[in-house]
Image (cartoon, helix red, strand yellow):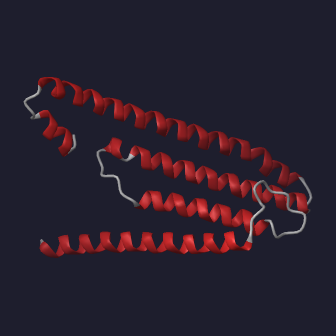
């Protein structure tokens, strides 16, 4: 039980004390439902990728195969995004504190996914979905990718510094 809930349970108002545990249970139920839906989306996306991989294995390596390969990569990255989001949603259920790093990782995967789609659009004969983009979009996405990587590096360095200081204090 987090400290806000524990503090709320010690308030003198009995109605408030009876509502807080119900709200906490509802919050947990919502996290479980969202996590389950994200896993269902990931599994369905992965299952729909299998026929594409099979088609690529049996087909000739032409421009159509290149398009199919990019679709497989796009779907695999979508599965990774679903899995990372499901993990992020389930963190509070395990009693851990929610941090920014999982969200930065999801953002980085989404940006990389879009960059791959845009760069594949430069290949002759590629007919991918959402491949129309400008060079400016590619520059902005590259800068965003760099910013996300720097943000992840800063968060990890702070975490390592805190661990080092705790070990040193012992």
Residue at 12 percent of width and 24 percent of height: 14
User: Compared with residue 55, is residue 141 higher up or lower down, i.e. above or below?
Assistant: below
Snapshot quadrant of residue 142 = bottom right
37 up-or-down from 121: above or below: above
Nearest the eye: 72 or 115:
115
Counting from the top left corner in percent of width and height, residue 57 is at: 84, 54
Q: Nearer the viewer, residue 58 or 154?
A: 154
Residue 38 vs 99, above or below: the answer is above
Q: Nearer the viewer, residue 20 or 164?
A: 20
Counting the numbered discs, the total is 0
Please tell me which residue is depicted at 84% across the width and 54% down the height of the picture. 56
Horizontal side, residue 103 vs residue 18: left or right: right
Q: Position of residue 122 (x, y in %)?
A: 82, 70
Q: Residue at x 55, y 70 (%)?
A: 144
How far from the left and from the top, in percent, is residue 2?
A: 22, 43
Give how far across and how far down residue 4 sits, in percent: 19, 43
Left or right: 160 in relation to 41: left
Farthest-out residue, left: 12
Viewer can see residue 65 = yes
One can see residue 61 in this view: no
Q: Quadrant of residue 162?
A: bottom left
């Amino acid at each position: 039980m987090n400290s806000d809930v524990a503090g709320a349970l010690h308030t003198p108002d009995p109605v408030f004390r009876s509502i807080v545990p119900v709200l906490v249970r509802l919050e947990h139920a919502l996290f479980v439902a969202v996590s389950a839906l994200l896993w269902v989306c990931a599994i369905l996306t992965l299952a729909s990728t299998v026929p594409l991989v099979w088609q690529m294995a049996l087909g000739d390596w032409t421009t159509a195969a290149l398009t199919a390969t990019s679709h497989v990569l796009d779907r695999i990255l979508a599965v990774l995004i679903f899995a990372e989001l499901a993990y992020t949603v389930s963190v509070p259920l395990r009693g851990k504190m929610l941090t920014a790093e999982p969200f930065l990782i999801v953002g980085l995967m989404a940006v990389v996914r879009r960059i791959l789609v845009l760069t594949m659009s430069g290949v002759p004969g590629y007919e991918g979905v959402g491949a129309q983009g400008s060079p400016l979009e590619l520059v902005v996405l590259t800068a965003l990718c760099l910013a996300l990587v720097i943000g992840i590096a800063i968060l990890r360095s702070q975490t390592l510094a805190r661990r080092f200081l705790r070990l040193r204090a012992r």
